Image (tube, rainbow, N blue to C red):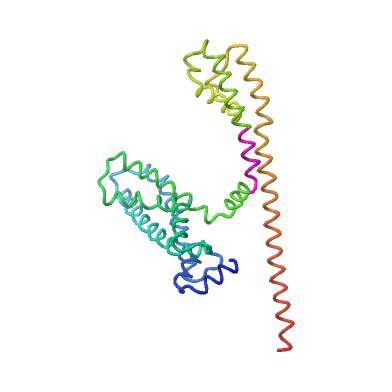
Amino acid sequence: MTGREESGMGRVSAGKRRTYLALEDVRCAHGAARAVSIALFILIVANALLVFAEPQINASSALAAGFVTFGLASSVAFGVEYVARLWIADLVYPGRSPLRARLRYMFSPMGIVDLLAFLPGLLVLVVPVSPSALNAARVIRLVRLFKLSRYMRGLHSIARVFEKRRPEIVAAFAVLALLTVTASVLMYEMEHPVQPDKFDSVLTGMYWAMTTITTTGYGDLVPVTAAGRLIGFATMLLSIAVVAIPAGIFSAGFVAEFRAQDARVQAHSKGSESLESETSDASPGE
C-alpha cells in the first residue's frame, strides 16, 4: 500500500477500510476482512466446479435444483461484491474523484467481469427467458472464472510482462499475422482450382495457415499441387523462426519480471531490518 493510499485510508470509516482490505489487499486484512476474502475465493472456485458438474446432472433431480439455488445465491453474493467494489473505488483509484473512480472501475475489464458474474443470473429471476437465453446465461457464468485472477500473483506477472513488452509483442504478432495472411492467400490461389470443395475461400486458407504455422497439422487440408506443397514447405520453415520470436520475448520478459520481484522483496526486507535496527538503537536512550 502506497503512502498516498495510507493517507487516504486514514480519512475513511473503519467499515470502508475493512471492505477495501477484504477486496483489494487481502495480505493486510485481518479478522472478518480476511474471512470475507477467503469466502469469496471459495465461492468463485465452487462456481467454477459447478460449471463443469451441472451439465452432468439430471435436470429433474433434487441435486439439480440445489445447483440452481446455489447459482442464484452466488449471483446475489457477487452482486453485493460489485456494489462494495463501487463503494471503495475511490480508494482503489485515489487520484480521481469518487464519480470518476467508480466509472473507471465500471468500465475496466475486471469491472465488466464482475458485472457479468451476477447480472445474467439475477435477470433470470425477474425476466421471462427462453431456454436458449437460459443456456446463454449459463455460458456467461464462465466469466466468473476470471475473478480468480485477483488471487493469482502469476497472472499479475503475466499482465506486467504484456505491459512492459507491448511494442515487441505487437511487432512479433504483426509479423506472424503477415505470414498467416500471405500463406493463406497463396495457398488458396494454388489449391482452389484443383480442390474447390476444400479450399473454398481465403478463410479456409487462413485456417490451413494457422494449423501449419502452429504445427498443429490436423491433416484435413493438404496441398496436392507442386506449387501448393512448395508454399507449405516455405511456410513451415518460416514459422519455425516466426513462432519462436514471441516465445523468446515472453521468456525474457518473465525472467526480468521475476528478478524485479526478487529485488523488491529484498529491498522490502532490508528496509524492515533497518527500521527494526533503528528502533532497537533508539530504545536504550529513551
In the image, residue 43 lies at what x, y percent?
43, 57
Q: Is residue 148 above or below residue 178?
A: below
Give the farthest residue toward the bottom.
Answer: 286
| Residue 156 as seen in the image, left or right of residue 58 | right
Q: Is residue 52 above or below residue 241?
A: below
In the image, residue 145 lies at what x, y percent?
47, 49
Q: Is residue 137 magenta?
A: no
Prevailing SS of the magenta stretch: helix
Residue 226: quarter of image: top right
In the image, residue 284 lies at what x, y percent?
73, 87
Front residue of this view, candidates 196 and 9:
9
- Seen at 70% across and 75% down, the residue is 275
| Residue 244 as seen in the image, left or right of residue 58 | right
- Seen at 49% across and 71% down, the residue is 31
Residue 262: quarter of image: bottom right
Q: Is residue 193 above or below residue 176?
A: above
| Residue 30 as seen in the image, left or right of residue 77 | right
* Residue bounds of the magenta highlight: 164-174
- Seen at 55% across and 72% down, the residue is 7
From the image, which quarter does the C terminus lie in?
bottom right
Residue 184: quarter of image: top right
| Residue 254 as seen in the image, left or right of residue 148 | right
Front residue of this view, candidates 126 and 219:
126
In the image, residue 188 lies at what x, y percent?
54, 18
